[in-house]
Image (cartoon, rainbow, N blue to C red):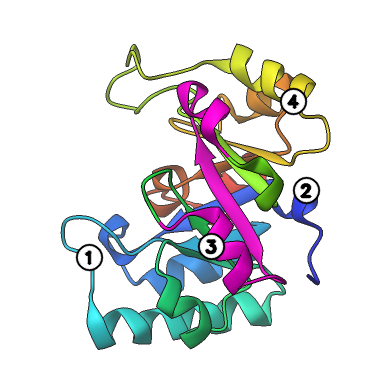
Amino acid sequence: MPFDVRKSLRKYFIMGSQDCKRDPAEILKAAAAGGITAFQFREKGKGALTGEAKVNLGKELRAICRQNKIPFIMNDDVELVNVLDADGIHVGQGDTSVVKLRKLFPEKIIGLSVSRNELADSPLEYVDYVGAGDIFGTSSKTHDKSAVGLEWIAELSSQYPNLPIVGIGGINTRNAASVIEAGADGVSVISAIAKADNIEETVKQL
């Protein structure tokens, strides 16, 4: 594993074409120039590409990551990990189990999304990092009851001091610092970068 996982989580950008109003490759290039430390290709949801179109975009984004020495993490799609020569894979609780993934990919980075009520059933010994959240809920629902808040980041980092943690959910330039201060190694964002007017400057502020 050529990347320092803890350092790679600091500014973790997640994106698929469905998140973009312009060319995803241009967005990723600007984000790389701004200083993102990891990228997750998450082509999922309404309007997402499938089949050959998804593979072709993945190859284009993978090349940008390689040029910039940024780890390229595949979201959920086990087959594309090999097709795109991804550096790792990130899954949610309902996706392929991390136990199976570790057998398939002993040398790759494996990340798992974990909420407060999922922690007890999560086999953390098989993962390289966790995505903890949702910290602030969605940006459209500031009082979303699913939000776990900063206190849980503090609890998690105290309970598992050797486990790299990236905060997820509703994070932007205004609240990113508070997530780090609470004990996370980094922050992961989608729209805060993908929809930013000045991507490079936004990344620097995270």
Range covered by the magenta-colored residues: 96-122
Q: CA distance from mark 4 to mark 3?
A: 25 Å
Give the SS element for disc 4. Answer: helix
Q: Are marks 4 and 1 in contact (CB under 8 Å)?
A: no
* Location of mark 1 (residue): 48
Q: Residues within 10 Å of mark 3 (few under 14, many from 20)?
A: few
* Location of mark 2 (residue): 6
Give the SS element for disc 2. Answer: helix
Residue 31: x %, y % from top left? 56, 60
Indicate whether 122 appears above or below 83.
above
Q: Amino acid at mark 2?
A: Arg
Q: Amino acid at mark 4?
A: Ser
* Location of mark 4 (residue): 157
Q: CA distance from mark 3 to mark 1?
A: 26 Å
Look at 48% across and 17% down and name the residue there: 148
Q: Does label 3 or label 2 sit earlier along the sequence?
A: 2
Q: CA distance from mark 4 to mark 2?
A: 12 Å
Asked if residue 16 lies left or right of residue 48, the reply is right
- The mark found on residue 100 in the picture is 3
Q: Residues within 10 Å of mark 2 (few under 14, many from 20)?
A: some
* Front: mark 3 or 2: 3
Q: Residues within 10 Å of mark 4 (few under 14, many from 20)?
A: some
Q: Does label 4 or label 3 sit earlier along the sequence?
A: 3
Residue 180: x %, y % from top left? 71, 29
Q: Amino acid at mark 1?
A: Ala
Res 161 quadrant in image: top right
